[in-house]
């Protein structure tokens, strides 16, 4: 799908509202094909972002797991290591 949308569930500290909204914005951009909608589509675009953000937050709030929360810094370091390995070969 979109590389800019990251897992938001089961992290310590939990995902912020801003992170949820950013992921929702990326999703709507991908689905609509617009980076920035025209004035005629701006209201529908913004409404869609808000609705997806609300649905995403509800989902995250209601998911359960027995796994321990992941550490954001550890996961970020792993992602950097994967990217360095992936792009070093290119």
Image (cartoon, rainbow, N blue to C red):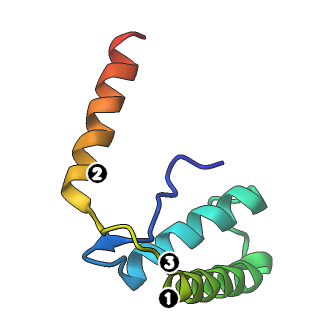
Residue 53, x across and y down, in percent:
58, 82
Tell me the distance, in whole angstroms, between the alpha carbons under discs 1 and 2: 21 Å
User: Residue 2, position in %: x, y?
Assistant: 60, 49
The residue under label 2 is 75
Neighbour class for label 2 at 10 Å: few (<14), some, many (≥20)? few
In this rendering, the answer to whether 15 lies above or below 3 is below
Which picture quadrant has residue 67? Answer: bottom left
Which residue does the numbered mark 3 point to in the structure image?
21
Q: Residue at x 65, y 83 (%)?
A: 46
Residue 43 visible, this angle: yes
Query: Which callout, 2 or 3, points to the residue nearer the camera?
Result: 2
Write the residue at 77% across / 83% down: 44
Tell me the quarter of the picture where residue 85 sits: top left
In-front residue for pair 79/38: 79
**To which residue does mark 1 refer?**
61
Q: Is residue 36 visible?
A: no
Mark 1 vs 2: CB contact within 8 A: no
Image location (x, y in percent) of residue 17: 41, 84
Q: Earlier in the sequence, mark 1 or mark 2?
A: 1
């Amino acid at each position: 799908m979109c590389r800019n949308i990251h897992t938001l569930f089961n992290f310590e500290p939990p995902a912020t509202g801003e992170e949820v909204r950013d992921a929702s914005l990326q999703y709507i951009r991908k689905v609509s094909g617009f980076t920035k909608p025209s004035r005629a589509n701006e209201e529908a675009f913004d409404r869609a972002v808000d609705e997806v953000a609300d649905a995403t937050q509800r989902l995250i709030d209601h998911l359960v797991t027995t796994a321990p929360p992941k550490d954001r810094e550890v996961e970020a370091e792993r992602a950097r290591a994967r990217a360095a390995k992936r792009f070093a070969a290119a």
